[in-house]
Amino acid sequence: MTFLQAVVEYDFLQKALMTSAMVGIICGVIGCFIILRGMALMGDAISHAVLPGVALSFMLGVNLLIGAVLSGLLTAIAIGYVSQHSRIKHDVSIGVMFTAAFALGIILITLQKSSTDLYHILFGNVLAVRPEDMWITLIIGTLVLVSVYLFYKELLVSTFDATMAAAYGLPVKLIHYFLMTLLTLVTVASLQTVGIVLVVAMLITPAATAYLLTSRLSLMIAWAAGLGLLSAFCGIYLSFTYNLASGATIVMTSTLLFVAALLLSPSQGLLWRALQARRRRLNNPERSLLKHEVSP
C-alpha cells in the first residue's frame, strides 16, 4: 500500500497530517520572531518549562493546555524578574529557571503510576494523535496566526528596534510577554507532534532556513511556514513508511532543508559564495596575483 492510499484509508494518518501541518506552520511563523530577537535560548526554555504544568495537569485530571500555559508563562516571568532584579544575566537566568522547571516536571512524571502518555509528550507521537488533540492544535494554530496578523506591525517594530518602539509609545514589555504567550501556545500545540525535547528544533530550524533565503520579514515568515509544512509532510511520510519516530523524522527533514539552504542559497549559500569568489578571481587574474604578491 502506498502512502497516498494509506492517507485516504486511515483516519489516524489524516489526523497526523493535519496536526503536523499546523504545527509546522505556526512553529515557522513564531520562530522568525524568536531568532530575530536573539531569543533562541528562550524558546528552548519555554519548551522545557511547560513539562511540570503538563505533568501536574495530568495528575489532577484537567486539560493539559491549562497547566502547560501557566507553567510556561510563570517561567518566563521568573526569568525576567531574576535578570532584572539581580546581578544574574539574562542567559544565566534562563539556564537556571528552565532546567529547574524541567527537573520538576521529570520528578512529577516519576510520581505517576503510568508515564506512558507523558513519555509521548517528551518525544512526540503524532501517528497516535487523538481527535481532541488535533482540534486543540488547530484552534491554537488559528489563534496564533490571527494574533500575528493583527499585531504584525507592533511585533515588527519591537523586534528590530525596541528603543524606537518605546519612543512611539508601544508597550515593549507587554509585547514581549505577548510573544512569550504565543510561544507557549505553540509549544503546547507541538507536544503530540514532536514533543518537548524536539520542539525547539521546529521553532528555530525552519526560521533559520528562511533567514538564509530572504532579508524581508514578510517573506521570511512565508518561507518559514512553507518549510515547516514541508518538513511535517516529509517527516510523516518517512515515519509511516519506515516505522521511525515521527518527531525525529520531522526534525531531521527540517535540518536537511537547512543544510541545503546553507550550501545553495543564492545570497548566503556557502557554495554559491565560493563559486562567485572563484569567478571574480578568474575575471581579475592580475588583481588576484597582485594580492598574492603583497601578502606576507
Image (cartoon, grey):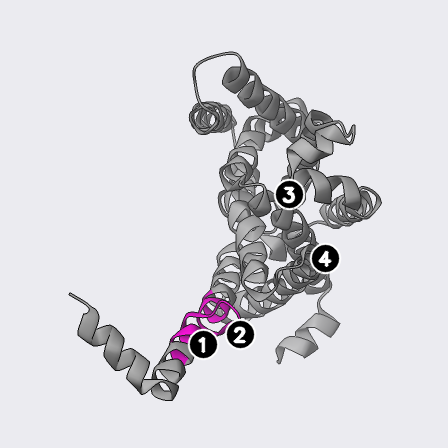
| Residue at 58%, 31% in the rendered image | 50
| Residue occupied by mark 1 | 272
How far across and how far down the image is residue 197, in percent? Answer: 49, 43
Other residues around mark 4 within 10 Å, as few (<14) / some (14–19) / many (≥20):
some
Residue at x 45% of width, y 76% of height: 272
Asked which secondary structure carries label 3, the reply is helix
- The residue carrying mark 4 is 218
Relative image position of residue 243 (x, y in whole percent): 49, 65
User: How far, Cα to Cα, is label 1 from label 4?
Assistant: 24 Å
Residue 268 at what x, y percent from top left? 49, 67
Can residue 124 be seen here? The reply is: no
User: Mark 3 and mark 1: span between their CA atoms?
Assistant: 28 Å
Q: Mark 2 sits on what residue? A: 266
Q: Residues within 10 Å of mark 3 (few under 14, many from 20)?
A: few
Q: Is residue 18 magenta?
A: no
Residue under the point 63% across and 67% down:
230
Q: In the image, which is nearer the foreground, mark 3 or mark 4?
A: 3
Task: Report, in whole angstroms, how far the alpha carbon at label 3 lies from the one at label 4.
Answer: 13 Å
Q: Residue at x 43, y 14 (%)?
A: 87
Overall secondary structure of the magenta stretch? helix
Q: Looking at the image, tell me whether mark 1 or mark 4 is earlier in sequence order.
A: 4
In the picture of the structure, the residue carrying the numbered disc 3 is 160
